[in-house]
Amino acid sequence: MSNLFSLEYAQQLDAQDPLSAIRQEFSIPKQSNGEEEIYLCGNSLGLQPKLAAQYVNDELQQWQKLGVKGHFSGDFPWMPYHEFLSDGFADLVGAKVKEVVSMNTLTANLHFMMVSFYRPTATRHKIIIEDHAFPSDHYAVESQIKYHGFDPTESMVLLKPREGEETLRTEDILSAIEEHGQSTALIMLPGVQYYTGQVLDMKIITEAGHAQGCNVGFDLAHAAGNIPMKLHEWNVDFAAWCTYKYLNSGPGSVAGCFVHERHHSNKDLPRFAGWWGHDKDSRFKMENHFIPMESAEAWQLSNPPILSLAAIRGSLDTIKKAGGIQKLREKSLKLTGYLRELLEQELSTEINILTPKDTAASGSQLSLTVNLHGADGKQIFDAIEAAGVTCDFRYPNVIRVAPVPQYNSFTDCYRFVMILKQAIEGAAS
């Protein structure tokens, strides 16, 4: 451990990293002095893959040259373009190809999924979510409950960590499901908690929810592209994710959605329908009788924005170049593990790491609070940002740092801790 906090040691780890060349597939932002930023914000917005820019430009050229004929011409015609993403999505979330689709945006997809999977009755009307859910999820759930005529104060079950703790215990989640299960219509939780970076046990939560007769869905905004999953095997009812964090597909890019195949043939399952969810063979007959496809595509409404899908395809192809999510996870465990070791060795009394140390309960992100009298996290955040670090801050006092295995290096981690240490020393002096 004596040489852990040294530039030479970090560079040695980079030299031994079989995925180090993938960094060259990304455009790294520059500081005002021309040096590359230490970009540790992939949990908020991933960097641009060079293939994404290339693929978007390809489609602009197609539009320029072909006009409307681009829907049916070229190597990647627009009409079925969303299908070119399905293999990549299926690999990332552990699904069958027919169980995934690219459509809409994350919160919109959560709403559309709740149309189908939140069917409250007088005796079964609750939704179990976490107390510190991402605000958009909370708003969506609360508005769905109100839409169905129920009172959120009675129908929302909010999971909270124990007093003095920052993360949820699995046994407490299961206890809440046991307590409220018979009156719960839906359990909707994150795969990875946005604030703490905690990975929830989706498999056991799904099993517990189904044992009580509840539908179970997950927001995978911070999980997709971060950790391997097995949604089909775990029997999850639905899931939704954005593609601009660990999937590096650009701000506001089109989201992804999963619907387990056992729901595909249920013609009585309510949904909001649009013509892009209609059977492909008869869609252009323009008959006003909805025939849903027997796949997750049945939940589509309209033809998607091709330029955004092109960026996603570029990102998925870049992930494929890296060897897929399993290879990325292997590097992530080493990269984030190294960052944690540095922090614990150099700043053990000055910072607290909220993210669980158990690798089964954590992904790329580490959430930090500063234990420094007279200095808050925002003050430290501003100082490290001025020194060339890009991460993010979440009120009231958390700095979120995410070394992403696709484009971050062990040297990035070393330099970040050196800058953080200097910022803390400066605030303390």
Image (cartoon, helix red, strand yellow):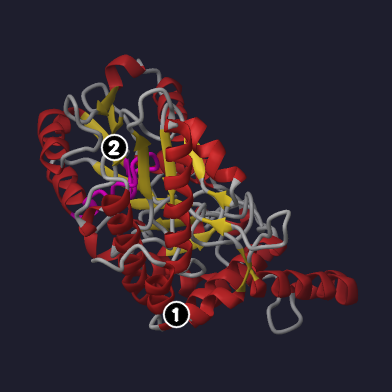
- How many marks overall? 2
Q: Main secondary structure of the magenta part?
A: loop
Q: Is residue 170 magenta?
A: no
Against 408, residue 317 (above or below) is below
Residue at image point 53% right, 72% down: 316
Q: Is residue 193 magenta?
A: yes
Residue at image point 32% right, 32% down: 371
Task: Give the residue pinned by disc 2.
Answer: 186
386 horizontally vs 402: left or right:
right
Question: Mark 2 and mark 1: span between their CA atoms?
Answer: 40 Å
In the rendered structure, which amino acid carries the disc numbered 2?
Leu
Task: Give the residue pinned by disc 1.
Answer: 19
Residue at image point 57% right, 69% down: 315
Quadrant assignment, res 307:
bottom right
Which residue occupies the foreground of this view, 208 or 227? 227
In the rendered structure, which amino acid carries the disc numbered 1?
Leu
Question: Can residue 341 be seen by looking at this rendering?
Answer: yes
Q: Position of residue 40 (x, y in %)?
A: 50, 55
Q: Position of residue 36 (x, y in %)?
A: 63, 63
- The local crowd at label 2, few if under 14, some if 14 to 19, many if 20 or more residues have their Cα within 10 Å, is many
Quadrant assignment, res 65:
bottom right
Which contiguous range is marked in magenta? 189-203
